Amino acid sequence: KLVGINPVIVHGGGKHINEMLKKLGMLHAQSATHTVRAVIIVDPEGIIRLDLDEIEGELKRSLIVWKMRGTKHSMRRHPFEITDKGIVVYHNKVLRVTRRGIIEEEVSGT
């Protein structure tokens, strides 16, 4: 039995993803109060989940590497930023889902 929404496959990068989110009604002023999730399949060897959540009124990006065959990787949800030099993943921070919401924490040993 299929539960939830049907997956949407978008080829061609960020511009096309934005267009698809607009068509699905997920990209508008109210999307700041919701969580947006995307699963990226990096060839058959890897799966990365990207999340966009509102935390204390601020949108936060995070990712989880679900699978990356042949590599040792964290199984925690790490925040990241997109900068003019590329993507910066904060390996020393994690986002945790609690009863009170989503909390960003500093961690050691990752």
Image (cartoon, grey):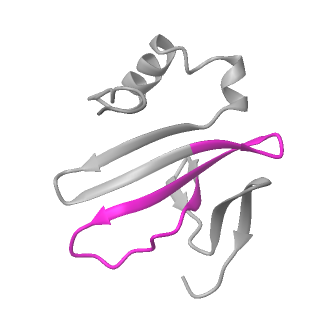
Q: Quadrant of the N terminus?
A: top left
Q: How many marks?
A: 0
- In the rendered image, the residue lying farthest to the bottom is 109
> Would residue 58 appear left or right of 25 to someone viewing this image?
right
- Please state the horizontal and vertical placement of residue 52, each as a whole percent of the image: 59, 42
Which residue is the extreme one toward the front?
A: 1
The quadrant of the image that shows the C terminus is bottom right
Q: What is the residue that sits farthest to the left in this orientation?
A: 44
In percent of the image, x 34 and y 45: which residue is there?
40
Q: What secondary structure do most residues of the magenta stretch adopt?
A: strand
Q: Which residues are magenta?
A: 52-80
Q: Going by the image, does 108 lie left or right of 64?
A: right
Q: Would you say residue 78 sits in the magenta stretch?
A: yes
- Does residue 95 belong to the magenta stretch? no
Task: Find residue 92 and report its horizontal and vertical position in percent.
Answer: 62, 75
Quadrant of the rendered structure where residue 35 is? top right
Image position of 82 (left or right of 17): right
In the rendered structure, the answer to whether residue 63 lies left or right of residue 93 reads left
**Where residue 96 sits: x, y (%)?**
66, 62
At 71% across and 30% down in the image, what residue appears? 32
Front residue of 11/9: it is 9
Q: Is residue 35 above or below residue 23?
A: below
**Above or below 94: residue 2:** above
Residue depicted at x 54% and y 14%:
25
Q: In the rendered view, would you say 52 is above or below 45?
A: above
* Residue at 40% over, 62% down: 65
**Residue 101: x and y, percent?**
75, 51
Nearest to the observer: residue 7 or residue 109: 7
